[in-house]
Amino acid sequence: MEMTKMNVGALRKALDRREISAVELATYYLDRIAQLDPQLKAFITVPRAEVLQMAAAADRRIATQEDVTALTGIPVAIKDNICTEGIRTTCASRLLADFYPIYDATVVAKLKQAGAVLLGKTNLDEFAMGSTTKESFYGLTRNPWDRQRVAGGSSGGSAVAVAAGMAPLALGSDTGGSIRQPAAFCGVWGLKPTYGRVSRYGLVPYAPSFDQIGPMARSGWDLFLLFRGIAGYDPLDPTSLPASVEAEGDLSGSIRGLRVGLPREFFGAGLDGRIKERVLAVAKVLAEAGCELMELSLPSMAYALPAYYLLAYAEASSSMARYDGVRYGIREGAEQGIVGMMTATRQSLGLEVKRRILLGTYFLSADCYEECYQQAQKVRTWMKQDFAAAYSRCDLLLTPTTAAPAFRIEGEAEDEPVLALTEQYTVAANLTGNPALSFPCGWINHLPVGAQLMGPAGTDELLLRVAAVYTENAPGEAVPERTARDVGEQIEV
Amino acid sequence: MWVSKLRYETVIGLEVHVELKTKAKLWCGCSTQFGTEPNTQVCPVCLGLPGGLPLLNKKAVEFALTTGLALNCVLADHCRFDRKHYFYPDLPKGYQITQFYQPIGREGWLEVEFADGPRRVRIKEIHLEEEAGRTYHLPSGPDGVASSLLDYNRSGIPLLEIVTAPELSSPAEARIFLEELKAVLECLEVSDAKMEEGSFRCDANLSVRRPGEKLGKRVELKNLNSFRAIEAGLVYEEKRQRELLAQGEPLPYEEVRTWDEEKGITVYMREKEQAADYRYFPEPEIPPFAIAGEWVETLRTNLPELPLEKRRRYREEYRLSATDAALLSRRKAEANFFEATLQKYQGSAQTVANWILGELTRLMKEEKAEVTNLQFSAEDFAALLQLQDQKVISSKIAKAVLEEMFRTGTKPAVIIEERGWQQITDPNIIKTLVRETVVANPAAVQDYLGGKQKAFAFFAGDVMRKSKGRVNPELLNEILQAELERHRSVGNSGYQSDRQ
C-alpha cells in the first residue's frame, strides 16, 4: 500500500477496515522521515516512542470502534512553536533547546482527544520570524521540489513534511503569511483561518494580534478535516470567537453566482508574469463554474507592508521580553548578576529575531510611538474598512500567494523585493483578521505555484469549497495534488 | 501680604497599591491565598510560559469599579489594558499588564476628617494591574552561595493602584488619609488591606515649598511598611527637606529614598528617572470591552454605607463619642454586630458600644476570635445587657456571663439560671448577710463609727465576696449604711444587749 498517495479519507477507510493499523501507518511515516529528512530537515524533533504509543492507543480506539473520529490514527506534524506537553518545543531557537512544555496547546489537546498521532515537531524560522525557514538554529529546511531552493516560511518544516509525504497533515502558524507562502512554494494547501477561529492557547507568540494556527495538507478535503479538528471556541483564549460565528461544516454546495474580485494591487509590477497567468487561469475555471469575476482596487494595500512591520515587530519585541533565562530555556552568564544573565541569555537569539526586537522596541519607544505605532494602527483600521468595502461588492478575492516561485537558498539580495511583494500579498489577511487560503494552481517548470483566496471573517469553509471546485475542474497538469505524491521518489533519485 | 520666610508648606501625594481579594488571580484560575508554600499557586499563564494567554477575571474589574464608585471616580466606559515593559526576574512576561491609556477610574475624591475638619482629598486615578512575583535575596542560598529565589504565587494577583493628587499637607494627614482609605476598602470587602501581608502598600511623594510658590522638587519614599513607618518616614523627610531649604539648598533633583526603619532615617536610593520608557502599548491579547451601564448601576446600588457616613450617623443618631463612633464603624463586622444588638436592645447605644469595645473586644483579643465567628448572637448579647439593666445581674456578673456565652454559646438567661447568678434584691436576705459580717467584725464597726469610711468598704466587700458578687450594690449600700448607723444610735454595746 502506497500510503503517501492516499488522502486522509482513504487512510481513514483503510484504518477502519483494518487494512492497516495506526502503528503501521505511524511506522511508515517515521521510516519515511528517517529516510528523507536528513536531506530536507523538515523536522526538529521526532519522538519515535511517543508516536508509537499514541498510534497504539489509536488502534485500541479503532478496535473497539469507540469514539473514532476522522483523525483517529492519522499522523499530524506540529510546527515547533506550538506547545506539546513533555515534548521539546524549541521554536527553532537555541534559547529553547531544552524547553519541555508542561502543557499542551489547545489545538494539540484537541488533536490528541480526536485520536490523532502527533508525528513530530517541524522546523521554522526562529520564533516564526522569517519567510524562508533558513533562520532556524537547527538548520535550514529545503524545498522538496528543488533542494537548492527555500521551503518558504516560517512554516517551512510543516509545508515540506506534507509536500514530501513525511506527514499527511501538519499544523503551521501564520502571522504575515507563514502558512500560505511555504504552502505555495511547496505545492500544498495552507489555510490562515479567521482570527479567533482556532485557539492560540499554547502557540508561542510572535505578534499575538496577527498570529493564527492553521492546517496544511495535500488536498482541500484533508485540509478541511484538520481544520474541523482544531477550530472552535476555546475559553482559554481571550480572542477566541464564540461558536456561533462558525460556519457550516462541509464543503458541498454550489459556488455558482459567487462574485470573485481580482484586486489590481495584487497583479501589478513585480509579479512574475507566469504566476499571473496561472492565477488568471484559476479565475477562468471559476468563471466557467459559474462565478462572476470583477476587477477592483484596494488602495490601502499601499501601506500594508509598513503597517505590518511596525505593528508585528512592536508586538514581537514585547512577546520576546519573557526570555530572560530565569524560568526556562537556556541560562547563560548566571555568574554575572541579574542584568548580566539576562543579557547573556538573550545574546543566544538569532540575528533576525534580534533585528525585530530592536526595531519593535524602537517603534514602541516614547519618541516614535505616536508616529509609528499609532499611525500603523490607523492604517490597520483603514485596511479593515477598505476590505470590508470590497467584500460588500464581491464575496471573495482571488490573488497570487507569492510574487515568484521558491527562490534559491543562495542569492538572497536579488530576491528581497520579490520577498517583500510576496509578504504584501499575504499580510493583508493578518492585518484584517480575515481568512486566507493558498492552494496549488500549476507549475513554473518544476516549481509549484499557489493561488490565494481571501474572504470576510468566517468564510474559511467557503474559501475551501471554491478552491476544491477549482481543483476538480482544473486541467490535470495544473494540480500538484496528483503529482506531489511522487516527490519522495523524485528526491530519492 | 507679608509671609514669613521661615514658614514652609509640605505637599504630599500618595500611590497606594491594593491587592484585590478575588479568589482567583487576574488572568488565570490560580488561588490568591496568602502564605502558602512558594510556587504552589502557579500555572502556564501566571508563570509567563510561552503560549499562555490572559483570561480576565471579571470579579477584579467589579472590585475596581466598586472602589471607583466609593471614591467618587469618573469610571471608564471601556475596560482596556496596556503592557508596561521592564526586565526583572519576578516579572515573568517581561511586561506588566496594567491600565495606562485608560485607567478604570479617574478624578475622584475621598472625604477625610482631619484634625482641622473634614476635607475632600482628590484621587487622580485608580487603575487595575497585575502583581509581580516575589524575589528573595539570600546571602546564603540552598547550596551555600548567595542566591536569589523566586516565588510566583503572588504573580498575577489583581492589584489596584490608587493615586492621590498632591494635596495632603502633613505626615499626620497622610496617615489619616490612608487609615480612611483602608477602612473604605475593608468596608467594600474588595481587599484585606493588610499592610503586614503586603496587600496594602504605599509609596509617598513629599516636597516642601514656601507658601504661594510652585511645587518643590519631590522625593519618592519607599519601604513604608506600616502606618507608623509612613508617618515617621514622612516626618523625617519633611524635616530634612525643610532644613535643606532653610540652608538655601533646595533639592538639586528628584530622587527616590528608602525608609530605614531601624535607624529612623531616609536613605538615598537613586535619582528619579527623567524619562523611564516603559514602551506602553495596548495589550493585544485582551480585547477591550464596554463597561455596561447597568453593571455599574447595580454596583452603585449595592454600595454599603461607607465608614465616614457610618461614623457620622453613630455620632449623630446614637450620640456616641467621636472615638467610639470611629472604633465601632471601622470594621464592618463589628459595626453590624453593634447595630444588630441595638435592634433588640432597649437601653442606650453607648452601653452597647462600651460593652463591645470593652469586654467583648478584650475577650476576642485574648482568644484571637473574630466578631463574625462568635458562639452567640447579637440577640443574646442584647439579652445580656437587658438583664443587667433590669438588675437581674450586676455588671460584674454580666461580665462573667459574657465570658461563659463566649466560650459555650449558652443563652445568658440559662447561664444565670444554672449558676444561680441572679442578683440578690431581697432586702431581708441582704440584711441577714450584712448583719453576719457586722457581728463578726466589731472592731471594724468601731472604726466606722469613729469616722473611718474604709470600714464601710470593708463590710460591703465582705458581703460581695460571700455572695459571689450577686448582691445588688445599691441595696447593699442602703442596708449596710442603715445597719451601721443603727449601731451609732444604739451605742457601742448595742449588739451585746441585742443578744441578750
Image: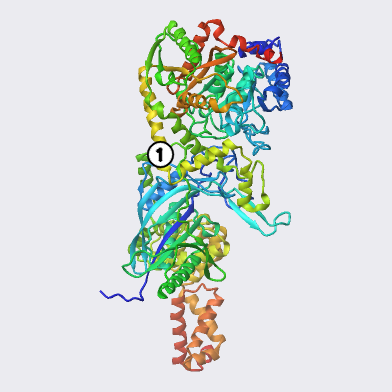
B444 relative to A92, above or below = below
| Number of disc labels | 1
Tell me the subunit letter for badge 1.
Answer: A
In percent of width and height, residue B412 lies at 50, 61
A381 relative to B347, above or below = above
Residue lying farthest to the left in this orientation: B1
In percent of width and height, residue A83 lies at 62, 32
| The one of B497 and A370 positioned closer to us in this rendering | A370
Residue B255 visible within the image = yes
In percent of width and height, residue B381 lies at 47, 60
Q: Residue at x 54, y 86 (%)?
A: B439
Residue denoted by label 1: A374
In percent of width and height, residue A37 lies at 70, 22
A104 relative to B135, above or below = above
Res A245 → quadrant: top left
Left or right of B364 in this view: A103: right
Q: Residue at x 35, y 74 (%)?
A: B7
Give the quarter of the figure containing the N terminus of chain A. Answer: top right
| The one of A150 and B286 positioned closer to us in this rendering | A150
Three-letter code, disc 1: Gln
User: What is the secondary structure assignment of the residue under circle 1?
Assistant: helix
A339 relative to A415, above or below = below
Q: Crowding near pointer 1: few (<14 within 10 Å), some, many (20+)?
A: some
